[in-house]
């Protein structure tokens, strides 16, 4: 898109907007508008020629887009997905991607990653190609007809109460112990805990607010409010500060997600608990305990911040101790007819 304009020095310039949305200005070196218009057409014709967009070029474009609109974690997934795609089909022209090549990509993924991870890549690339279509870089989404892989229903991994006791006993770092307990009693995600500030903890009304920030976006983009458990209220009230991050390192900066992942894994190994437990298992633990406490799934959904109730329903299929106790309370006769 080109626009001719005159600057204070009397010379006409051509303003161009490239495919990335970036502006550039080019002098016609003319004071006469008619002459400037002729030169402007030449400049526009040279600089606005259709640019060949390869996968690597589009990868950089979509990376910038994701970093602007999504969290760092999501932007990283976009980047990794296209690294995988380029590894599979090569750095070909974006418009040359076909549904058949997407099927090849899916098959190549299965050679190195699990179906659930392959599906994550496919969904991400499909979303990116929808953006490319909106930008008019492609006419159709080649990933639209590529079906996701069938994934067996895997029950979320959660810790039993005796496991939690064992884990907490083996955590010597007081701050990290608070992090673990906060995750269990709130179901907050790792990134949400890292970005938690004291201003988000309302001790008067006993709420914790999970918010978007300039450097952090809540998954799905929707902030939420979590009721503060009395235990968490008592645990953090005496530490309450007016500002800053709740969890900081020795230099006073916010801790990183990697620090949480690494430290949690060390604590799991030290406590002798199964390697299958990850920090995200604490979120599953919170959800499972809520369901076992007979909490309505709608309430569990709001606490965890799930966009769809379907995601929350996976916890409804877990062994429910409340139902187990209900069955055990049935007063069966000691002798049943026909069972002598």
Image: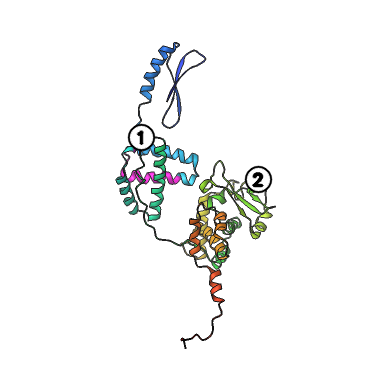
In this view, the mark in front (1 or 2): 1
Q: Residue at x 52, y 50 (%)?
A: 257
Disc 2: CA contacts within 10 A as few (<14), some (14-19) or many (>=20):
few
Q: Which residue is drawn at 63% across and 55% down?
A: 227
Residue 132, position as x, y percentages in the image: 40, 38
In the rendered view, does 60 fall on the left or right side of 196? left
Instruction: State yes or no: discs 1 and 2 in contact (Cβ < 8 Å).
Output: no
User: Where in the figure is residue 308, as x and y percent of width and height?
Assistant: 50, 53
Examine the image and state in which quarter residue 229 appears.
bottom right
* Residue that carries the numbered disc 2 in the rendered image: 243
Is residue 320 shown in magenta?
Answer: no
Dot 1 falls on a residue whose secondary structure is loop
Callout 2: SS: loop
Q: The magenta stretch spans which residues?
A: 76-94
Above or below residue 231? Residue 40 is above
Residue hosting label 1: 53
Earlier along the polypeptide chain: callout 1 or callout 2? 1
Report crowding for label 1: few under 14, some 14 to 19, many 20 or more residues within 10 A (C-alpha). Answer: some
Task: Determine the CA span between mark 1 and mark 2.
Answer: 46 Å
Residue farthest to the front, as pictured = 337
- Position of 6 relative to 71 (above/below): above
Residue pushed farthest bottom?
340
């Amino acid at each position: 898109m080109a626009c001719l304009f005159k600057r204070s020095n009397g010379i006409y310039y051509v303003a161009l907007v490239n495919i990335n949305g970036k502006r550039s200005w080019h002098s016609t070196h003319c004071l006469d508008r008619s002459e400037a218009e002729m030169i402007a057409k030449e400049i526009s014709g040279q600089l606005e020629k259709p640019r060949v967009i390869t996968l690597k070029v589009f990868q950089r474009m979509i990376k910038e887009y994701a970093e602007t609109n999504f969290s760092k974690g999501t932007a990283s997934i976009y980047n990794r997905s296209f690294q995988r795609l380029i590894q599979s089909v090569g750095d070909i022209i974006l418009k040359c991607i076909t549904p058949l090549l997407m099927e090849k990509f899916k098959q190549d993924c299965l050679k190195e990653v699990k179906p659930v991870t392959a599906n994550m890549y496919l969904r991400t690339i499909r979303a990116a190609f929808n953006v490319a279509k909106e930008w008019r870089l492609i006419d159709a989404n080649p990933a639209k007809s590529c079906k996701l892989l069938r994934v067996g229903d895997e029950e979320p991994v959660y810790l039993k109460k005796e496991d939690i006791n064992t884990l907490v006993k083996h955590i010597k770092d007081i701050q990290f112990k608070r992090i673990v307990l906060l995750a269990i009693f709130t179901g907050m995600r790792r990134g949400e805990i890292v970005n938690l500030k004291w201003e988000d903890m309302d001790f008067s009304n006993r709420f914790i607010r999970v918010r978007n920030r300039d450097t952090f976006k809540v998954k799905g983009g929707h902030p939420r409010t979590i009721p503060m458990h009395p235990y968490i209220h008592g645990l953090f009230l005496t530490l309450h500060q007016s500002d800053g991050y709740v969890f900081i390192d020795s230099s006073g900066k916010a801790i990183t997600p990697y620090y949480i992942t690494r430290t949690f894994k060390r604590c799991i190994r030290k406590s002798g608990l199964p390697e299958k437990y990850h920090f995200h298992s604490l979120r599953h633990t919170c959800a499972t305990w809520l369901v076992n406490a007979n909490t309505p799934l709608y309430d569990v959904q709001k606490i965890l911040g799930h966009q769809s109730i379907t995601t929350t329903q996976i916890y409804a299929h877990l062994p429910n101790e409340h139902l187990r106790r209900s069955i055990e309370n049935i007063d069966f006769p000691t002798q049943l007819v026909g069972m002598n």
